[in-house]
Image: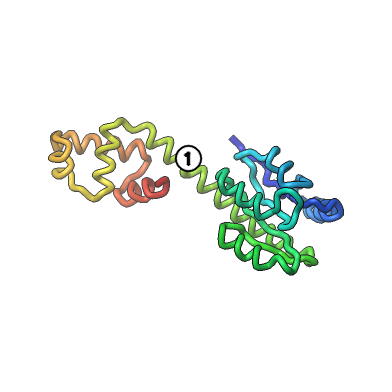
Amino acid sequence: MNDPTPTIYVVDDDEAMRDSMTWLLEGEGYAVACFDSAESFLKARHDDMRGCLILDVRMPEMSGLELHERLGTLGSQLPVIFVTGHGDVPMAVSALQRGACDFIEKPFHNQDLLVRIVRALELDRQISARRQRDGAISHRLDQLTQREHEVMKLVVAGKLNKQIADQLTISMKTVEAHRARVMEKMGVRTLAELVKAVMMVR
């Protein structure tokens, strides 16, 4: 399945700001989608969104900060760049501490915004790659039988084959067979690779 096209999502209640952002970003070759409120963005939002979100801090009804918190509860990993007025900087810093990607103060130079967007899109690419990798590992884990899961858990905990055999009351030969199948199904060659794969999805 191909990844969706990365899109710059702009959420701002100021129509002039949305228009100028669209003009700037489309001129740079980006796909752009604008929303005039946090609520309208939430209605359109889905888990497969790729790209980044440019979010105005101050909006009527639901503020940018409230939208950011709501997205966090929904499990969204879309990188967020806050656009702030001068008095909103402390709020923006607080949002960074809660997982926002960046913020920029109005009035800003277009180039400064574009630099932040490049960084946010790179972060989104890394998040997407990690999600795909974790999904592949989870799929492999699902292929293990219950006994293979039990053996793998003990192997990853550093237990020796003899200790595993004693704990599960099975023969050493059976442990070795299960262990070999776990390695094969998980697509790893060494114990270190197995431990790393399991840690990634925990």
Location of residue 31 in the rendering, given as x and y in whole percent from the top left corner: 75, 46
- Identified by mark 1, the residue type is Gly
x%, y% of residue 123? 59, 55
- In the rendered view of the protein, which quadrant contains the N terminus? top right
> Is 85 above or below relative to 197?
below
The part of the image, by quadrant, that contains residue 105 is bottom right
User: Tag 1: Cα neighbours inside 10 Å, few (<14), some, or many (≥20)?
Assistant: few
- Residue 188, x across and y down, in percent: 35, 44
Residue 27 visible in the picture:
no
Q: Is residue 164 visible?
A: yes
Query: Residue at the spot x=48%, y=44% of the render?
Result: 133
Q: Residue at coordinates 70% horizontally, 38% vertically from top-left?
A: 43
The structure's colour scheme is: rainbow
Q: Position of residue 65 (x, y in %)?
A: 66, 55
User: Is residue 41 found left or right of 171 in the rendered image?
Assistant: right
Q: Name the foreground residue: 79 vs 85.
A: 85
Which residue corresponds to mark 1? 135
The foreground one among 23 and 18 is 18
> Who's the residue at 31% across and 40% down the image?
183
Up the image or down, 101 lies above or below 129; here it is below
Q: Is residue 86 left or right of residue 196?
A: right
For image coordinates 85% across by 51% down, the residue present is 15
**Residue 17 placement, left or right of 66:** right
Q: How many marks?
A: 1
Q: Quadrant of residue 106?
A: bottom right
Secondary structure found at label 1:
helix
Nearest the eye: 154 or 59? 59
